[in-house]
Image (cartoon, rainbow, N blue to C red):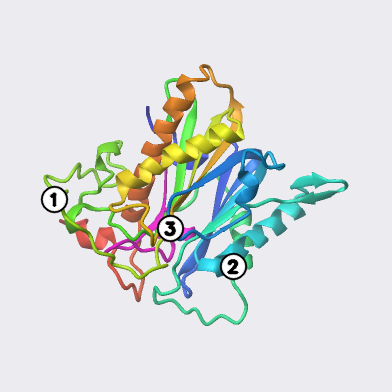
């Protein structure tokens, strides 16, 4: 397994990502857009999720493919970011065909960033416009850290952020992850610089510090945020030809990446969820072995993406917590 050329989810050919931010509000939106419709599924393991159109992703539901997935800040307000992406897709003539009409189906998930110090006194909900801006910005290259849906994110004691990573398997299948990290738990060990995800790091993609020398596994963590203030929302993707049921299993497997990179994970106060996307460009060579390896790669990519998102976060005036770079880069 090796990273793709960009080490981004867009190493899965046919996928584009766009970010839009409002730094005065300290929030943003990230849109994953396919060059053509793709199979998608979702799995929720956190206790406080916020979602739109996720029921349609069930294997027993009518819609087989979607055109885009949205990750957004803003709690319930942020769900309206999907409306901006729907507008962009409709203008492009895309969506689920119903007679002579096209109805874009855009699943979305949100995180809570309403208490991060930004100006939340808007008169009109800013998220539809941010969603449209993210759709219009969709490209193969995009920013990590304090960008898109990760703009206002925090973790237990550091700024969170938007992360991504990719892998190419020996079979030739590409796998990628995209995540907005806003967790109740910690991404580093014992308040130090070493990431929990270090065993899965490739090269020095999030600092190359390696695993922590020691930690106390028996330590009992306490919540550092209030109920409803957390959530890690992610997308994993592959170019493999998977059906909706197989994509669902991929989303389930990828949750291991959250547990490897955030401690504790999947708490009652987080809304942790993972979307899985399959573009279908590359057939399975082995219907048993390939999904097994793709699931493992997705979990590893997601763990790496979480660490990369926090590692890339930038300091901004008025921050209430430090960035990893400010606290540890010189140490």
> Which residue is depicted at the point 32% across and 49% down?
307
Q: Is residue 6 visible?
A: no
Tag nearer the camera, 1 or 2: 1
| Residue 93 visible to the viewer | yes
Residue 247 magenta-highlighted: no
Q: Quadrant of the C terminus?
A: bottom left
> Which stretch appears magenta?
144-166
Q: Earlier in the sequence, mark 1 or mark 2?
A: 2
Question: In terms of sequence position, does the residue under pointer 1 or pointer 3 come before the other?
Answer: 3
The residue to which callout 3 is attached is 47
Q: Nearer the viewer, residue 225 or 301?
A: 225
Query: In whole angstroms, how far apart are the C-alphas of marks 2 and 3?
Result: 24 Å
Mark 2 or mark 3: whose residue is earlier in sequence = 3
Above/below status of 115 relative to 328: below
Circle on res. 127: 2
Specify the label residue 216 is tagged with: 1
Quarter occupied by residue 66: top right
Image spot of residue 232 (x, y percent): 42, 55
User: Residue 140's x, y, as percent?
Assistant: 54, 44
Front: mark 2 or 3:
3
Secondary structure of the residue carrying numbered label 3: loop
Q: Secondary structure at mark 2?
A: helix
Dot 1 falls on a residue whose secondary structure is loop
For marks 1 and 3, give the one nearer the viewer.
3
Crowd band around label 1 with a 10 angstrom C-alpha radius: few (<14), some (14–19), many (20+): few
Q: Residue at x 59, y 50 (%)?
A: 69
146 part of magenta stretch: yes
* Mark 1 and mark 2: Cα distance apart in space: 42 Å
Question: In what quadrant of the picture does the N terminus appear?
Answer: top left
Dot 3 crowding, Cα within 10 Å, few <14, some 14–19, many 20+: some
Relative vertical location of residue 324 with respect to residue 1 in this rendering, above or below: below
Image-based side of 70 in relation to 191, left or right: right
């Amino acid at each position: 397994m090796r990273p793709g050329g960009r080490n981004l989810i867009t190493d899965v050919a046919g996928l584009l990502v766009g970010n839009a931010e409002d730094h005065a509000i300290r929030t943003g939106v990230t849109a994953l857009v396919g060059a053509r419709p793709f199979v998608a599924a979702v799995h929720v393991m956190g206790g406080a999720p916020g979602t739109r159109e996720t029921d349609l992703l069930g294997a027993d539901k009518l819609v087989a493919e979607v055109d885009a997935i949205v990750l957004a800040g803003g709690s319930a307000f942020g769900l309206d970011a999907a409306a901006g992406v729907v507008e962009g897709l409709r203008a492009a003539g895309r969506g689920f065909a119903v007679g002579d009409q096209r109805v874009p189906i855009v699943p979305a998930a949100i995180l809570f960033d309403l208490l991060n110090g930004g100006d939340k006194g808007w008169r009109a909900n800013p998220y539809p416009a941010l969603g449209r801006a993210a759709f219009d910005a969709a490209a193969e290259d995009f920013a990590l850290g304090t960008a898109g849906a990760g703009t206002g994110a925090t973790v237990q004691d550091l700024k969170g952020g938007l992360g991504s990573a990719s892998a190419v398997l020996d079979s030739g299948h590409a796998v990628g992850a995209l995540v907005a990290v806003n967790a109740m738990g910690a991404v580093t060990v014992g308040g130090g610089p070493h990431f929990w995800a270090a065993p899965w790091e490739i090269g020095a993609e999030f600092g190359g510090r390696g695993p922590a020398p020691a930690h106390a596994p028996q330590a009992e963590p306490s919540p550092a945020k209030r109920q409803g203030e957390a959530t890690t929302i992610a997308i994993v993707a592959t170019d493999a030809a998977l059906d909706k049921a197989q994509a669902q299993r991929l989303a389930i497997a990828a949750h291991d990446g959250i547990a490897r990179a955030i401690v504790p994970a999947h708490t009652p106060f987080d809304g942790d969820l993972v979307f899985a996307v399959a573009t279908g460009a590359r057939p399975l060579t082995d219907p048993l072995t390939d999904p097994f390896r793709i699931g493992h790669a997705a979990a590893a990519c997601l763990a790496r993406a979480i660490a990369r998102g926090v590692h890339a976060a930038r300091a901004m005036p008025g921050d209430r917590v430090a960035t990893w770079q400010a606290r540890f880069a010189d140490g």
